[in-house]
Amino acid sequence: MALPKYKTSRANTHSRRANWKATAAATVNCPNCGAPALPHMACPSCGNYRGRTYRSAIQPAHTK
């Protein structure tokens, strides 16, 4: 295996690592309720996907 002949400076290391960025997840608006949801997934607000209800909406466990 090849080894580096010289030490890589901090500036070169940081400039190389500056391109490793996380991208935000793409969201679409739910056609049923209009809340943002991940594509090809059930809506977290109403539980609908492609006109069907797959689960009930998330309700808080304890309300005052």
Image: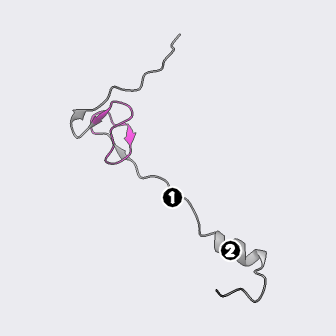
Residue 4 in the image: above or below residue 16: below
Residue 54 in the image: above or below residue 17: above
Q: Amino acid at mark 1?
A: Thr
Q: Amino acid at mark 2?
A: Ser
Along the horizontal axis of the image, is 50 left or right of 19? left
Residue 53 among those drawn in magenta = no
**Residue 62 image point, x, y percent:** 51, 14
**Residue 7 image point, x, y percent:** 78, 82
Q: Which residues are magenta?
A: 31-48
Q: Mark 2 highlights which residue?
A: 15
**Residue 34 image point, x, y percent:** 33, 37
The Cα–Cα distance between marks 1 and 2, rounded to whole angstroms, is 18 Å
Return the disc, 1 or 2, that comes first in the chain's sequence: 2
Between 47 and 2, the residue placed more toward the observer is 2
Along the horizontal axis of the image, is 11 left or right of 20? right
**Residue 27 image point, x, y percent:** 40, 48
Q: What main secondary structure does the magenta stretch of the protein show?
A: loop
- Report which quarter residue 2 is drawn in: bottom right
Q: Mark 1 highlights which residue?
A: 23
Between 4 and 48, the residue placed more toward the observer is 4
The residue sitting at the top extreme is 64
